[in-house]
């Protein structure tokens, strides 16, 4: 459905009250400081058909915009640019990263933004641009810059939240009372990989835009966004490596704990074996065993058992097995 629609001229917004086709016709008659921005959220093919026919958008790009599930990319169809961005939102309660998409069609006098998912609504981007008429007068490239900047800034906030969760996992790994956190490590690692799949393909897209051959907007704007994205990209790589280290440390500690448990089990088995062996020998009741008729045989046997158990326990305790 259409979320917002407006015509911008000289950096000023004017709402579209009538037919969208009339707004497009008006923008075409004006100079380059006039353009139409139509914002849609998860439109159907039928809902998008009017805009497609009006702007003569390429069928393949329209199919991508309607169906979604695309990698970040930049494509040119005649005089129209088609850009795909992945949006991210982080849920602290579950440590889940929600992924959405923004598709942009940019022409000389129009911008069509198609958003999928709940992450990163574009209303704040519109408000930001509308408070900066100087930037807005540069036309559709200003919209592309503002959306890229907002998406990448949100990547940075998500990267910070992920880092906080990794630090908590590190503490849990070395906290004996925390228990087994392997499932939590794997869950967060899966989210980090999903994060990388969203932001890493955007790097070559912004590099291409930052070269200054894609839009008329000063390339410095996009180089700034690219710098932020490269920092996020490095953080995501660091997070992935750190999670590998956390997993390795946790498995090592689990192995150490299992070894300690096996030592204790073996130690108690050795202690129990002492009286078992003695009782087994003297429980055979052969007539020619002189100790069976000995008055002090029973207390001496118990004393030997107790002393032997004490010696074995002391040795095992001293060696660290108990």
Image (spheres, grey):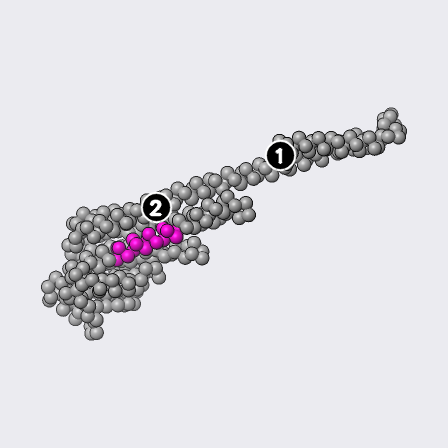
The magenta stretch spans residue 111 = no
Image spot of residue 172 (x, y percent): 49, 47
Image spot of residue 114 (x, y percent): 27, 61
Q: Residue at x 38, y 56 (%)?
A: 90
- Quadrant where the C terminus is found in the figure: top right
In the picture, the disc for residue 202 is none
Q: Residue at x 76, y 32 (%)?
A: 305
Question: Would residue 151 be visible to someone looking at this image?
Answer: yes
Give the quadrant of residue 18: bottom left
Under circle 1, the secondary element is loop
Q: Which residue does the numbered mark 2 point to in the structure image?
A: 235
Which residue is more in the foreground, 120 or 306? 306
Which residue is more in the foreground, 201 or 159? 159
Mainly helix, strand or loop, the magenta region?
A: helix
Under circle 2, the secondary element is helix
Q: Residues within 10 Å of mark 1 (few under 14, many from 20)?
A: some
Q: Which residue does the numbered mark 1 point to in the structure image?
A: 321
Image spot of residue 271 (x, y percent): 70, 34
Using residue 79 as the reference point, say whether residue 172 is left or right of it.
Answer: right
Question: Would residue 205 be visible to someone looking at this image?
Answer: no
């Amino acid at each position: 459905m259409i979320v917002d629609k407006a015509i911008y001229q000289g950096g000023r917004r004017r709402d579209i009250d009538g037919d969208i086709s009339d707004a497009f016709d008006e923008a075409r008659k004006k100079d380059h400081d006039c353009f139409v921005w139509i914002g849609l959220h998860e439109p159907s093919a039928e809902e998008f058909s009017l805009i497609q026919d009006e702007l003569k958008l390429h069928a393949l790009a329209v199919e991508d915009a309607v169906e979604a599930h695309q990698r970040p990319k930049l494509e040119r169809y005649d005089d129209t640019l088609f850009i795909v961005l992945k949006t991210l939102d982080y849920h602290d309660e579950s440590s889940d990263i929600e992924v959405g998409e923004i598709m942009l069609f940019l022409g000389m006098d129009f911008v069509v933004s198609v958003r999928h998912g709940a992450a990163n609504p574009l209303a704040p981007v519109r408000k930001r641009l509308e408070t900066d008429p100087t930037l807005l007068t540069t036309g559709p490239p200003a919209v592309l810059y503002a959306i890229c900047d907002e998406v990448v800034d949100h990547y940075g906030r998500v990267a910070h939240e992920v880092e906080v969760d990794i630090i908590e996992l590190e503490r849990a790994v070395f906290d004996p009372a925390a228990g087994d956190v392997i499932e939590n490590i794997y869950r967060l690692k899966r989210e980090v990989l999903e994060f990388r799949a969203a932001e890493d393909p955007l790097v070559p897209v912004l590099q291409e835009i930052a070269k200054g051959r894609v839009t008329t907007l000063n390339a410095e704007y996009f180089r700034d966004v690219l710098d932020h994205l490269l920092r996020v990209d490095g953080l995501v790589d660091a997070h992935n490596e750190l999670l590998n280290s956390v997993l390795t440390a946790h498995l090592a500690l689990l192995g150490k704990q299992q070894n300690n448990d096996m030592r204790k089990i073996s130690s108690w088995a050795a202690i129990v074996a002492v009286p078992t062996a003695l009782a087994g020998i003297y429980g055979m009741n052969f007539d020619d065993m002189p100790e069976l008729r000995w008055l002090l045989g029973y207390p001496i046997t118990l004393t030997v058992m107790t002393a032997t158990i004490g010696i074995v326990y002391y040795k095992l305790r001293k060696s660290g097995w108990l």
